[in-house]
Image (cartoon, rainbow, N blue to C red):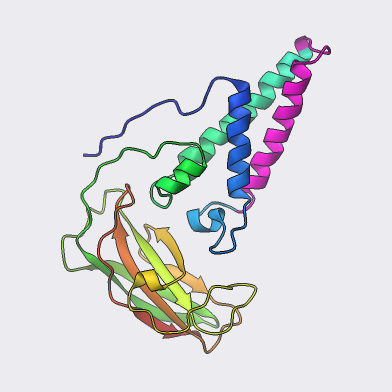
């Protein structure tokens, strides 16, 4: 059984709500040079940050009017409606996307949030999968499954962290390449979290390059089990 501590993370002060929204927009629209941007790493639609930014700007304008000499019933209503739209969107984003995993403690801190206190057993089983080549540029990992150890309950919130990387010259689609065969998953530059039994990867323009994969279980607290075997395939 999991134990979660619930608390109200969103202030009831509009200035604080707006400040948090701006922090989220800054994080969600950032473009770090050493790793993929947060939406890509966290499985969030790329337009989420822009949409939240639009709501924050409208709320900021309404708040400025509410504090001005023009303040009146209509402006107060406008301010209430814009902040309701903003905070409703923030709660939706947090509920749908700000989960652990894929976010870690540092990610939560950057968003002004406390990491959720969730306790699950650490996985002990490795993970393996079969590789198929369903089409040009396409590699699919199918039948993702436990290998040894005690597999997590299929009804639980456990999932699989998939690490992968490609050989070859960096491209506009992937500027993070590997120059030698990996020994473990931490040698691979990309990762994604999934609870599916199969995942399809499209490597457009990378025919002939070798792709490597390595999988491991993760519990909802972000604690990881051992890596499974290195899987590889040449991009068709």
Write down the quadrant of residue 211 in the picture: bottom left
Pinpoint residue 98: horizontal percent, then vertical percent.
46, 44
Pinpoint residue 24: horizontal percent, then vertical percent.
58, 41
Question: What residue sits 46% from the left and 75% below the top?
Answer: 165
Name the foreground residue: 207 vs 32: 32
Name the foreground residue: 85 vs 21: 21
> Is residue 223 placed above or below 147 in the rendered structure?
above
> Is residue 180 placed above or below 98 in the rendered structure?
below
From this viewpoint, is residue 96 visible? no
Write down the quadrant of residue 33 in the picture: bottom right
* In magenta segment, residue 235: no
Question: What residue sits 19% from the left and 60% below the top?
Answer: 124
Question: What residue sits 36% from the left and 38% below the top?
Answer: 116
Pinpoint residue 183: horizontal percent, then vertical percent.
33, 78
* In magenta segment, residue 64: yes
Question: What residue sits 58% from the left and 47% below the top?
Answer: 27
Among all residues in the image, which is located at the extreme bottom? 208
From this viewpoint, is residue 50 visible? yes
Name the foreground residue: 70 vs 203: 70
Write down the quadrant of residue 117 in the picture: top left
Q: Is residue 143 left or right of residue 114?
A: left
Q: In this view, does 143 lie to the left or right of 92?
A: left
Q: Quadrant of the N terminus?
A: top left
Query: Magenta stretch?
Result: 46-73
Labels in figure, total: 0
Among all residues in the image, which is located at the extreme left? 149
Principal secondary structure, stretch drawn in magenta: helix
């Amino acid at each position: 059984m999991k134990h979660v501590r619930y608390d109200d993370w969103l202030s009831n002060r509009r200035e604080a709500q707006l400040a948090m929204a701006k922090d989220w927009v800054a994080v969600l629209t950032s473009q770090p040079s050493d790793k993929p941007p947060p939406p890509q790493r966290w499985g969030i639609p790329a337009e989420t940050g822009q949409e939240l930014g639009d709501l924050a700007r409208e709320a900021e304008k309404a708040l400025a009017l509410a504090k001005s000499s023009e303040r009146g019933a209509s402006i107060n209503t406008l301010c209430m409606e814009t902040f309701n739209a903003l905070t409703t969107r923030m709660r939706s984003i947090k509920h749908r996307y700000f989960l652990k995993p894929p976010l870690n403690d540092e990610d939560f801190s950057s968003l002004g949030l406390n990491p959720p206190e969730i306790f699950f057993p650490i996985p002990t089983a490795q993970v393996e999968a079969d590789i198929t080549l369903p089409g040009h540029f396409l590699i699919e990992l199918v039948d993702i499954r436990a290998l040894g150890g005690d597999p997590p309950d299929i009804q639980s919130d456990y999932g699989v962290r998939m690490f992968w990387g490609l050989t070859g010259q960096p491209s506009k689609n992937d500027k993070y390449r590997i120059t030698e065969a990996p020994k473990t998953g931490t040698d691979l530059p990309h990762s994604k979290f999934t609870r599916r039994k199969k995942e399809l990867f499209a490597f457009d323009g990378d025919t002939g390059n070798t792709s490597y994969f390595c999988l491991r279980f993760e519990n909802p607290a972000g604690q990881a089990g051992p890596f499974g075997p290195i899987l590889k395939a040449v991009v068709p």
